Amino acid sequence: MADPDPNSPTRIDYGNELLQKTLQPGWTVEADGFGLFQSRCIFKIDTSKLIDIFGITQFIRGDDHPYSDSYPNLKLYKASYVTDKNGISTVTAEYCGVDTYLHPDGITDTQCAMVGSSASEDIAHHPNFIRSNCTSGGLGAALAGPPNGSPNGLYNNALWTPITSGVTSYQQFVGFAPSQTDDVNKINIKAGVKSYYKPQITVRALLYIQKSSEELTQAFALDLASYVGWVTNGSLFNLPIPYRRLALAPGEGGGYSGSFEYEEKYQDLIHRNFLITNCSVELFGTTCKVTADLMLSGISGWDKDIYPSVSE
């Protein structure tokens, strides 16, 4: 067989010259169930033409979706292309946007992830340190009792040291002392205990925002982020009711099976809330992704003299 003619063209043009981007079958649209739409579209176009327009006049962040009549809020957020040997390129374009039919305010439902953990805390901060306040799971005895002891003596060999400040005298907890006898029945199991593991809950909130313009979208998202260091009941980030219940007392419709139970007088002092410890904003096309961490307070809430509260 003779060798192929080196001057013979490897590309034979016929039909559509692909001088304009041409959408290919198989494009997809995905809904995340919380109000965000994403779409991936494949286009074919002549490579020489593509080089002149890619990222300059077409395939620019914020471009409309090919079916913009059906998906007006789907906007381009990234695109890439691969060149073929025949001088034709394949472009992959990705779009995202908020479903404004179900979310006319341009804000998706908030997705939440809760993380429960424990951290070491001074034993003197335990709710049952001086008197019995927490009654959950068999709790009920005071750990150290008042500094002057009880009629029956000090609780668990709690040691206190007197401190004088000006004309005011008070006592500071030192620790639990070991038993002063070899009687095995009188061993103090709290000897040396200075801390306990305090439960800690953090809720991570994720939502997407797309307003009528990119400027309004970013301004709204950054306004949320400006509240880092503030206290909220969760409504600022549209936390679903089941997650807000983490901060509510049983009498307010809150609490779960594992929530601690307290005596009635102590229960009235419980006012939990969330501290916004972190918030990030990312721009995808014309849509902002907002992620925030909300840390649940202790039983009395975050200190009002230290942390400002969002008016909600």
Image (cartoon, rainbow, N blue to C red):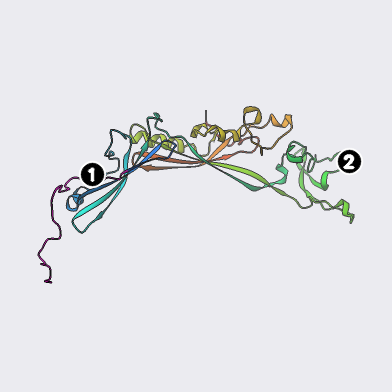
* Residue 146: in magenta span: no
Q: Which residues are magenta?
A: 1-27
| Amino acid at dot 2 | Asn
Front one among 294 and 54: 54
- Residue drawn at (49%, 33%), measured in percent from left and top? 238
Front one among 248 and 182: 248
Disc 1 crowd rating (10 Å Cα; few below 14, some 14-19, many 20+) is: few
Q: Position of residue 151 (x, y in %)?
A: 88, 38
Query: Would you say residue 50 is visible in this rendering?
Result: yes
Give the quadrant of residue 260: top right
Front one among 265 and 93: 93
The residue where tag 1 is placed is 58
Q: Position of residue 100 (x, y in %)?
A: 37, 31
> Relative to residue 210, is residue 294 drawn left or right?
right
Give the label on residue 152, or none.
2
Q: CA distance from mark 1 to mark 2?
A: 85 Å
Give the quadrant of residue 255: top right
- Residue drawn at (69%, 46%), measured in percent from left and top? 122
